[in-house]
Amino acid sequence: MSLVFAAETGQVHLTSQTRIVAAVLALFFMFLILELIRRDRLQERYSVIWFVAGLGMLVGAAFPGTLEVVANLMGVRNTNVALFSIVLLLLLGLALNFSVIMSRQAAQITRLAQERAIEKALAEVRQDEAQTSLGKDAGSRSSSATSATEDAA
Amino acid sequence: MRTLVFIPAWNEEASVAGVIADVRKAIPEADLLVVDDGSTDATAERAREAGAIVASLPFNQGLGAALQTGYLYALRNDYEACAHLDADGQHPAEEVARLLAEVTADRADLVIGSRYHSGAVAESGDYKPTFSRRIGISVFRFFLTLATRQRFTDTTSGMRAANRRVMSLFSWHYSPDFAEIESLQLAVRQGLRVEELPVRMLERAGGSSFLTPLRSAFFIFKGLVVLLVGQFRPRHAEAER
């Protein structure tokens, strides 16, 4: 634990000032996400990953030693490199996640457009049929009425 | 047998009425649907005037989505056979009738009209591919044959006839980008009987092809990726024979 808390020892050089700024930023980030969910601007299912990212930032600010532990686990000597690699991978994963969501929504939009086009076409066909049968009914009553309906149609 | 002929059309106001009249004459028993793919001109009005049913997509979605709309319409409305042809007047309707005959006789599930089949007769005014197009065609032909172990000569033909099994499959999945090629691969992988018939096609009435060399190269590359991915796609349960 002493290693985890010791920011000024080892390879992690964070002053308490930077740690406070990082912690405040992380808290602000998490608050922003909560606020977005509360205002229905962000759906819960897309917010989990962002919340996890915010928590990670907070942990990194509070216990800079964890970063060194993680870097050691990755076999990376320089903790900065470890940090950037983790963030880069996280962003790559997020971008891929968005592409997947976008593809699904594109497919859904296409199907929606197709369903609507078919519904409208069928409604037109039914309307035409109704008009034709109307014309026939009128025709059985009087021939002059038939031509009138046809003109109207 | 209830038959639907559908025509995907995107800004084809000049030619669509002529194509409809041609189909009416050659296949009088079929119902006619024009899938208007978000046209900004009078395509839908011209088609309606010519007596076709019109299904208008609210925005342009690409050929694949338009064709899928046709297959979905045929499936939903219990048509036993369907066929489609291009709206630009390249496809003579009497050739479509020949494709439909193959399907109604139950000799195949999906029939493709081929421009390049050895049996196709070339006449003056008939379709002749350009050089860059010929390269693309032979590349796709090679890889599709490799993927399906069945010989195809015209992989990008937009003149086809199909039965209900195919309608069900294509309503479920139809590639929006590489409609023609991937659909062939999908149908063969599904175990459907896919057949090519030599047909005559005409030279485009107007407009030019969209292919430049760079675009052709990109088109071919994209096509190969689609084919590769398609080899690992799961099968569709409903259309299984």
Image (tube, rainbow, N blue to C red):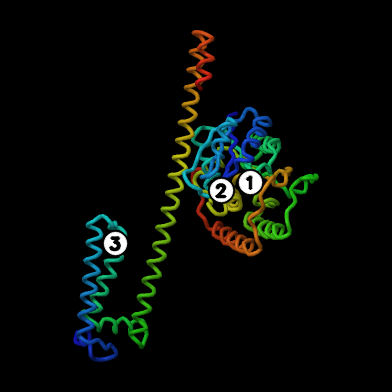
On the same chain, marks 3 and 1? The answer is: no
Q: Is residue B24 above or below residue B114?
A: above
CB-based contact (under 8 Å), mark 1 and mark 2: yes
- Residue identifier under label 2: B63
For the residue marked with disc 1, what is the amino acid? Gly
Q: Residue at position x 52%, y 47% from top?
A: B65
- Residue identifier under label 1: B158
What x and y, as percent, mark residue B29? 62, 27
For the residue marked with disc 3, what is the amino acid? Ser
Q: Is residue A93 above or below residue A59?
A: above
Question: Gap in Å between the C-alphas at discs 1 and 2?
Answer: 10 Å
Q: Can I make out residue A110 in this image?
A: yes
| Chain containing mark 2 | B
Left or right of B89, for residue B62: left
For the residue marked with disc 2, what is the amino acid? Leu
Q: Can I make out residue B169 in this image?
A: no
Q: Is residue A73 above or below residue B203?
A: below
